Image (cartoon, rainbow, N blue to C red):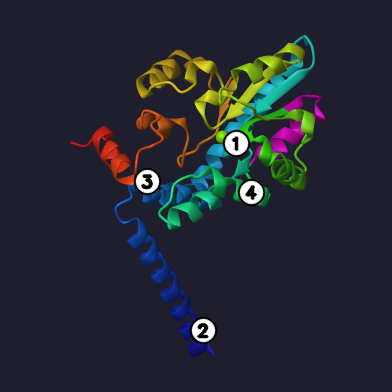
Amino acid sequence: MKKYVILISALVLGCSTAKQQSATAVSSSNLTAEGKLFTALFQQRAAEYKALCFQAFNIAHIRVDEALLLPQSGPLAIVTDIDETVLDNSPYDVKQSLQGKDYEQKSWEEWTALSRADTIPGALPFLKYASSKGVKIFYLTNRAETERKGTLANLVKFGFPDAVNENLILKQTVSSKEARRQKIAETHNIILLMGDNLADFSALFDKKPADERLKNTYASAADFGKRFIVLPNPVYGDWEGAVYQYNLKLKAAQKDSVIKSVLKSY
Ligand SMILES: [Mg+2]
């Protein structure tokens, strides 16, 4: 019996090694795809990733309690991003990267239509807590209208509070979330903004060059952990776009060159 177990283990190991090798072969000159495999590994397997998420939501919890003690001017709201803030899309990144591919709208929409994203650690209990205290939750995302059904189904599946059409604010024409944030602020007192991307917090970060993002981050330092709750996302985001100066047409080899040109060594 033991012999069979060893044999089967060897076969399984052999298969996975072969699979890894073929993935390496496809993407051997593609730093982006390989980098995304490694960062997705951090998101999926590092307990430290989970700890960072818990840290973010623990701070958010404190901020909600503080807000509840203050005299309230209008209904309170939390505006949260969805991807890599409350839902975990790392399986999509892994699948793309194993094929040597980066993000593509078509395959992305196929993934979101499955409604199979798991929750980000701590997101659901935190939002349920805030909702139980009367705070409205708005899901402000750059997912497209075509993704509405799958997105809602994914949120509803886990019992996310306020997962209804009116509170799911998708991208219409522009990526900037500023106008949509302002619209919510007309009727609600937004106590917290949650996101993995700086553009989830302020127009100060909308498609800005890397040095300006950095400068504005230092200028906003006091807001992080206060009004702004930041979740870690090492896999993708405007931080990556800024490295490429938002040039969406760069080929993998060109991205490799840019990455090597901006990294510091000694
Ligand atoms: Mg996001």
- Which range of residues does the magenta coloring cover? 122-137
Label whose residue precedes the other's in the sequence (3 or 2): 2
Q: Is residue 88 magenta?
A: no
Q: Is mark 2 within 8 Å of ligand 1?
A: no
Please tell me which residue is depicted at 44% across the width and 70% down the height of the picture.
16
For the residue marked with disc 4, what is the amino acid? Answer: Ala
Q: Are marks 1 and 4 in contact (CB under 8 Å)?
A: no
Instruction: Please state the horizontal and vertical placement of residue 247, each as a whole percent of the image.
Output: 38, 32
Q: Which mark is residue 5?
A: 2
Please tell me which residue is depicted at 66% across the width and 52% down the height of the picture.
116
Q: Nearer the viewer, mark 1 or mark 3?
A: 3
Q: Which residue is mark 1?
A: 85
Disc 2 crowd, CA 10 A, few/some/many (<14, 14-19, 20+): few
Q: Which residue is mark 3?
A: 32
Q: Which residue is mark 4?
A: 117
225 sits to left or right of 98: right
62 sits to left or right of 43: right
| Quarter occupied by residue 19 | bottom left
Query: What's the distance in space between the residues labelled 2 and 1, CA to CA?
Result: 41 Å
| Quarter occupied by residue 98 | bottom left
* Up-down relation of residue 256 to residue 28 (above or below): above
